[in-house]
Amino acid sequence: MRLREIYGKTDPKISFEVFPPKEISDYPILMAELEKLKKFNPSFVSLTYGAGGKNNNSQELVRLISQNGFSVMPHFTCICSTKNFVTEHIKNLEKSGIENILALRGDIPDDPEICCHDFKYANELVSFIKSNSSLSAGVAGYPEGHIEAKDLQSDINNLKKKIEAGAECIFTQLFFDNDKFFSYVEKVRNEGINVPIVAGIMPILSSKQINKMIKLANISIPQKLNEKIIKYEQNPKDLQKFGVEYVTGQCRELLNTQVSGLHFFTLNKSEASYKILENIL
Ligand code: FAD
């Protein structure tokens, strides 16, 4: 089912994001984690691509996840890809029965020399995908602004270019302050962008994980959460327990405002997402 149809109905949709394990021998572990989440009837599983600037051959994993009964939305980053490579990649995805793709620019690698310059921004990738395939494209949105953007408004103006290029859906960066998300949705709608906005949900697994996120992606941490992160720094079990409670509260509030969907960044672990979903569904 295409993104437009998935999010065309009024009830909020659940989806899970995973990343390709480093070793092929770990694929069964990932599949076992996903199997546990099947009972929540996810609309799809999304599979990250080349995070950290490295390419990876994720097509085999796309097929494996599909064969296990999930619809798959692969991510794709264009910053280091030639047009020829993208053409071949999207053709292969279509041949495997894939209908949706998350079209991203990707982070600029430490050595920008390894980038070819066929695509500078994600809106160019969306245009290319729309002209050369029948895939439906989703794109990334940043409730607190993308880390390189001058300010939130200019980032939203750039988001609009991706929608005008044909993107059908926005998947947001994680956030821990729902008010940032609500204010973002309002600003995006004020720009005349009417596609579904799916909330990125990050279960809290450890203080190390949260601190890394803050550094990498410009995410603010509400005082209440920050206090617990500090308090439970040496006690990951208690932090996880509090995290489930905290993110459950976030999800409940989002569902009450008729969010289009909740997209869980599972980090390839089912337990926290499972507990949160049990609480809210
Ligand atoms: P763009 O939309 O191109 O934006 C990048 C920056 O350029 C922004 O600051 C924007 O304001 C600006 N900009 C955009 N268009 C223009 C324009 N036309 N002119 C001038 N400025 C412009 N990374 C991975 O490597 N692999 C993944 O699988 C992955 N999955 C992700 C999933 C989600 C839900 C999210 C939110 C992010 C994901 N990322 C992933 C991270 C993403 O690749 C980085 O945040 C990257 O730095 C930006 O990608 P983008 O597609 O948002 O870029």
Image (tube, rainbow, N blue to C red):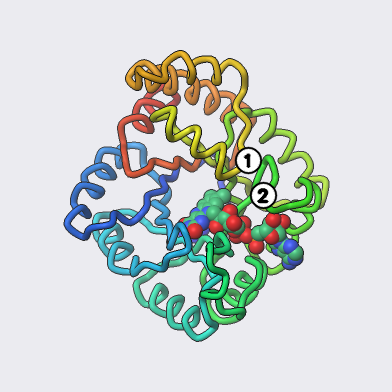
- Give neighbour class at mark 1: few <14, some 14-19, many 20+ (Cα, 10 Å): some
> 37 above or below 66?
above
The residue lying toward the viewer, choosing from 245 and 240, is 240
Residue corresponding to mark 1: 218
Q: Amino acid at mark 2?
A: His
Q: Indicate if the residue with disc 2 has its beta carbon within 8 Å of ligand 1.
A: yes
Say left or right for 267 vs 81.
Answer: left
**Badge 1 element:** loop
User: Does the rendering let one see residue 5?
Assistant: no
Q: Which residue is found at the position 78% from the left and 47% from the top?
A: 151
Location of residue 256 by image quarter: top right
The residue lying toward the viewer, choosing from 255 and 191, is 191
User: CA gap, disc 1 to disc 2?
Assistant: 7 Å
Which mark, by number, is residue 109? Answer: none
Say left or right for 97 vs 186.
Answer: left
Location of residue 225 by image quarter: top right
- Residue 209 is situated, as x and y percent measured from the top left of the image, at 43, 35
> 267 above or below 67?
above
Residue corresponding to mark 2: 146
> 136 above or below 223?
below
- Residue 58 is situated, as x and y percent measured from the top left of the image, at 34, 65
Q: Amino acid at mark 1?
A: Asn
Q: Do labels 1 and 2 touch, CB within 8 Å?
A: yes
User: Does the rendering let one see residue 176?
Assistant: yes
Q: Which residue is found at the position 49% from the left and 16% from the top?
A: 228
- Residue 219 is situated, as x and y percent measured from the top left of the image, at 61, 36
